[in-house]
Image (tube, grey):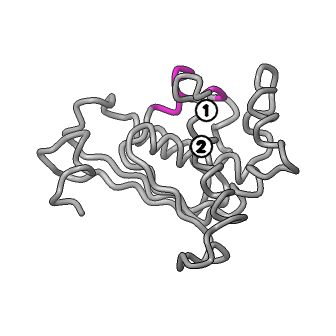
Amino acid sequence: ACLGGKAAFLEALKIIDAWSTSAPPNVPINMSAGVTVMGHSTGGRVALMVAAVKDDPMYLSGMGFSWYNEQLDANGGALRKAAGRVVAVVPLHPDNMESAQFNPDVQGFYGAITQTPVFATVTVLDEVLDPDTVWNNFRMVKSKHKIYGAFVSTCGHDDPTKRHVS
């Protein structure tokens, strides 16, 4: 269940957990080096929520969040351990973290990211997000290792998906 995207962060944590516990031996991935979570739009929200879960066990712990905690704490806390492997997040044009439509724990998110480095980006011509969305998300992050970039581009919200960016 993705709950309209609100639980999409769990899918990222499941992938990290799977690669950490059962990666094929012939795949040259060193999971002990840490993981960076990067995503665009909803994926950017996922990156921010993963960092919040990693840095603040109180995020998603209030009334009405029992389902999220059941998922995070299942299998000996496997998904919380997966979050612990994250060393940085890169949200590209992330959804509005001040909206309960996207973030189930808006109040708990404010200040939840205290340690994880964050590099948040947006383009000045993003026609999908409200003008201050990414800046306001960035201001909610309290990690001392954070960067905000607003880039000039004619591609708008889909800029990270365009060939010239890669």
Q: Main secondary structure of the magenta part?
A: loop
For the residue pair 67 and 114, the one nearer the viewer reads as 67
Q: Is residue 104 above or below residue 146?
A: above
- If the image is split into quadrants, where does the C terminus sit? bottom left
Question: Label 1, on which residue?
Answer: 7
Q: CA distance from mark 2 to mark 1?
A: 8 Å
Q: Is residue 154 above or below residue 100?
A: below
What residue is drawn where x is 59% and y is 23%? Answer: 3
Amino acid residing under circle 1? Ala
What residue is drawn where x is 54% and y is 75%? Answer: 27
Task: Give the total number of marks visible in the rendering.
Answer: 2
User: Label 1 crowding class (10 Å Cα cut-off): few <14, some 14-19, many 20+?
Assistant: some
What residue is drawn where x is 42% and y is 41%? Answer: 94
Question: Label 2, on which residue?
Answer: 11
Tell whether position 101 is magenta: yes
Q: Which mark is residue 48?
A: none
Q: Which residues are magenta?
A: 96-105
Which SS class for mark 2?
Answer: helix
For the residue pair 160 and 1, the one nearer the viewer reads as 1
The image position of residue 155, as x and y in percent, is 15, 44
The image position of residue 111, as x and y in percent, is 66, 44
Q: Is residue 24 above or below residue 110?
A: below
What residue is drawn where x is 52% and y is 57%? Answer: 37
Badges 2 and 1: C-beta atoms under 8 Å apart? yes
Tell whether position 67 is magenta: no
- If the image is split into quadrants, where does the N terminus sit? top right
Which quarter of the picture shows residue 165? Answer: bottom left
